[in-house]
Amino acid sequence: MFTNYQQTLEYLYANLPIFQRVGAVAYKKDLTNTIQLCEVLGNPQLKFKSVHMAGTNGKGSTSHMLASVLQASGYKTGLYTSPHLKDFTERIKINGQEIGKEFVVGFANRIRPSIELIKPSFFEITVAMAFDCFAQQQVDVAVIEVGLGGRLDSTNVISPVVSVITNIDYDHKDLLGDTLEQIAAEKAGIIKHSVPVVVSERQPEVENVFIEMAAKVESFIHFAQDKYSVQQSDNALHIFRNDKLYINKLSLPLKGIYQIKNLVGVLKTVDILMDNGFLITKESLIRGLEKTVDQTGLKGRWQQLGEKPLMVCDTGHNAAGVREVMRQIDLQKFDKLHIVWGMVKDKEADEILALLPKRARYYFCQAAIPRALDAHLLKQKAEHFGLYGQVTQDVNQAIVKAKQTAGSDDFIFIGGSTFVVAEIDTL
């Protein structure tokens, strides 16, 4: 019997394989365990309406924006995302409030015999916990983010109102395939029979994968950028619907320019939800978008941590995400650039390091997880690309070194891995 939260987490971490910590060995390539866990719990995933969210990048931001809009529209809204940054309870939220630690303890005690019997992964347990929580709390709707891939992801046992796919790029090639078409096919696995699907971007290399899957399962497919476009000026966004101004001067708290791609996906998903009986006014849409961070607690997406010197972190960690982050850095005005950088072992390090600016001074670090790439090895790899700096293994000590070195007009960026950002003390 677990008596407290810390004891419960220690059991889960010690006994269940955790992808975020150990990598591919924790990835289960079928849904059997999740189905069995859900059956033990009375199939809670069937007791609430849901939106299913997949994609290489942007699915977390898109999930949070959509959850905030639904919350602003008066719906009791569940939100399941992963991984967490600071505390396990971040993964499961209702109306922006993290799951109570006592619920985690109670759930683990109830399900422990099944854990011993089924031997699920850590992720499979967290998914079942989220579904159980949302069913018990009788949420009106839950936004469910895929953990990895789609077709074989533990979340893929729900029957959503709408499925959403943000974009496709290279990531987890060892698990999802080494071509964009193969990766897209895995993401397309969340497309369900007769359930509409929204695809945020038209990508010529893969859009036919989604079109063919939708046709196969008789799902109507919507490409969001066919209907919506966004222009940016004076720190405000101007949204066009069918080429006509729809929302003027939206102030989105998620400042990364890559959020424009995510935003159109949110807008089209809202249309589909309204077609399915959800009441979402333009006022609540705007309010929800503008209060995304306040209402959901989203962290680590081009998040400012300080000024003079300006200091920003971002969780972008694959080539596509890092490319967008570098575009954003290029838009900043500063004297000198300082980058605190760490990675995990199973990313394409050479492909990512080739994207980083040579003009920066680097502080190589590593997160305190087994998957972390050794900071000394990272420094060696970086030097092959003309990237030079020092090794300070601890993330926060590396940030201190950067702040000590930087002038007030300099810019400090912290990133390379979700787990580097997670360890920032001031986040």
Image (cartoon, helix red, strand yellow):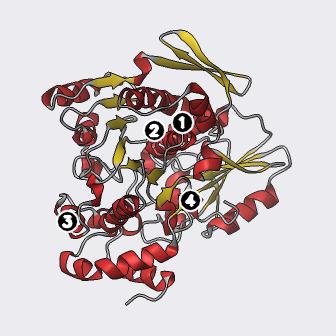
Instruction: Give me the residue at 25% from left, 34% from top.
Output: 195
Q: What's the amino acid at mark 2?
A: Ala
Q: Secondary structure at mark 4?
A: strand
SS class, disc 1: helix
Count neighbours of disc 4 (C-alpha within 10 A) and say few if under 14, some if 14 to 19, many if 20 or more. Answer: some
Residue under label 3: 39
Q: Quadrant of the N terminus?
A: bottom left
Q: Badge 3: how crowded within 10 Å, few (<14), some, or many (20+)?
A: few
* Amino acid, disc 1: Glu
Q: Which mark is residue 97?
A: 4
Q: CA distance from mark 4 to mark 1?
A: 30 Å
* Label disc, if present, on residue 320 of the rendered structure: 2
Between circles 3 and 1, the one closer to the viewer is 3
State the CA–CA distance, disc 2 to disc 4: 31 Å
Residue in the image at 26% along x and 68% along y? 41
305 relative position to 183: left or right: right
Indicate the amino acid at tag 3: Glu
For disc 1, the marked residue is 324
As measured in the structure, the alpha-carbon distance from the residue carrying label 3 to the one carrying label 4 is 27 Å
127 up-or-down from 333: above or below: below
The answer to whether residue 261 is seen in the rendering is yes
Q: Which residue does the image show at 54% across and 36% down from the upper left?
A: 324
